[in-house]
Amino acid sequence: MFRLAVAASLVPAALLAQLRGEALRTRIDSLVNAPIKAGQVVGASVAVVKGRDTILVKGYGKANVELDVATPVAGTAIYEIGSITKQFTGAAIMQLVEQGKVSLDDDVTKYLPTFKTGGRKVTLRRLLDHSSGMRSYTEIAAARSFFPLQLPRDTMLRVVESQPWDFEPGEEQIYNNSAFYLVGLVIEKVSGMPYGEYVKKNLFDRAGMPDAHYCSETAIKRGKTSGYDFDASGPIQKRPLSHQWPYAAGSLCMTVRDLVAWNEALHRTNKILSAASYKEMIRPDTLNDGYRVGYAKGLSLTPVLGHPSLHHGGGINGWTTENMYFPAESLSVIVFYNTSGPSGPSEVAEGIVRAMLGVREPTAVPVTGDIARFRGTFAGRGRGVPQQLSIEPRNGTLEAVRGAQRRPLVHVGNGTFLLGSTKFVFAEQGGRVVSLRVDNGSGNNILRPRP
């Protein structure tokens, strides 16, 4: 027996592309099947589309465990997408801005006059990039008791306004579902249409998304997956949640094919927004101190594995999702799970990106001066709970330490270090560190050294 080696240059281009495509699809299958085989995910749908080239649209695992129903392979299974909803809300408000019906600099109380802000001016801009400072209702214990219930929407407003503010508008950035809840109410007030009706008519229908709709916990929808949460025993029935509450922050349902169509319509054509409005939608604003955040109107703008990307994940009772779009390559990588458990879809999505585009490692820059000056324990606000981490020099660089976990940071200049797409920005005065900004795109928290 012998092997015949053939140079790639002698293989017809179409056949070579086919062979590479098959290898990539095999790799994707391996990535998605791993957490399913490990019992961490029940079912999944994946779409990988580059320009007009569909590389893979496929279902994996089970759409329903009780009836042993496999996830459809054609990408027709419907999932609750959670916080990916936020970019639809952002696009909807930008349409209203384009029509001259609202301004991003309007105070939210112009449209919701009964909402109490304690005299603070809270613009739509501050709501749309998580820098308003109000408390997110998903982090308010008093709000969780009525998550399964159908109550008037202003019930949530009364709970949010009763809470102390985390910070003054524009001082920091903490991921905030209350903000997008309020934006949904503004859309309804200005358009005169229920939110679900508005997005269907002005977003889904324009983009060509036949299965996309506002979710319901009671309506029967053909093709919808069953959702599962997780406990120590493994998958369990999802916990009850009324779609009165995720609303404009997380209550949309669709297939991976629908989301591919959305990425095309939003990012590659002018079906949803004019070129100028789209440019504004993906333009991040600054905090009060001039620092430009990495989030804009429902989209995270941080690089993925070093590649420029517009992306967002979602998590809701029973489902977790990830949507990554890479403009330079016109590449959509979409992963949906019908499981809220120990394995998240971003891990698989990043694995697909790594297989397709590789990793662009940041260029390390030597630290000037004594690196030991960055050592310390830093504390400040986080999402729902205080945030604390330690910074320790080791082998000529810094490590971020949380408990037993140690992660090396890469210095890219001017006291800025990277850990993946998260920035660690040190501010110094008089030769000592006075603050550490931790910026992961949707969160931008300023931590202070602990004594």
Image: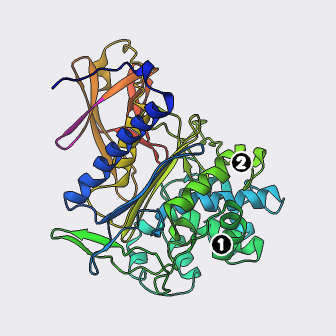
Q: Residue at x 38, y 27 (%)?
A: 433
**Viewer-nearest of discs 1 and 2:** 2
Check whether the beta carbons of the residues at disc 1 and disc 2 lie within 8 A of each other: no
User: Residue 187 at what x, y percent from top left?
Assistant: 70, 69
Where does label 2 land, which residue?
A: 269
Circle 1 packing at 10 Å, graded few (<14), some (14-19), many (20+), is: many
Q: Magenta stretch?
A: 402-408
Q: Residue at x 25, y 69 (%)?
A: 230
* Horizontal side, residue 130 vs residue 335: left or right: right
Whether residue 164 is visible to the viewer of this picture, yes or no, is no
Q: Which mark is residue 185?
A: 1
Whether residue 101 is visible to the viewer of this picture, yes or no, is yes
What type is the residue that disc 1 sits on?
Answer: Leu
Q: Secondary structure at mark 2?
A: loop
What type is the residue that disc 2 sits on?
Answer: Thr
> Could you tell me how far apart the alpha carbons at marks 1 and 2 are, in whole angstroms?
28 Å
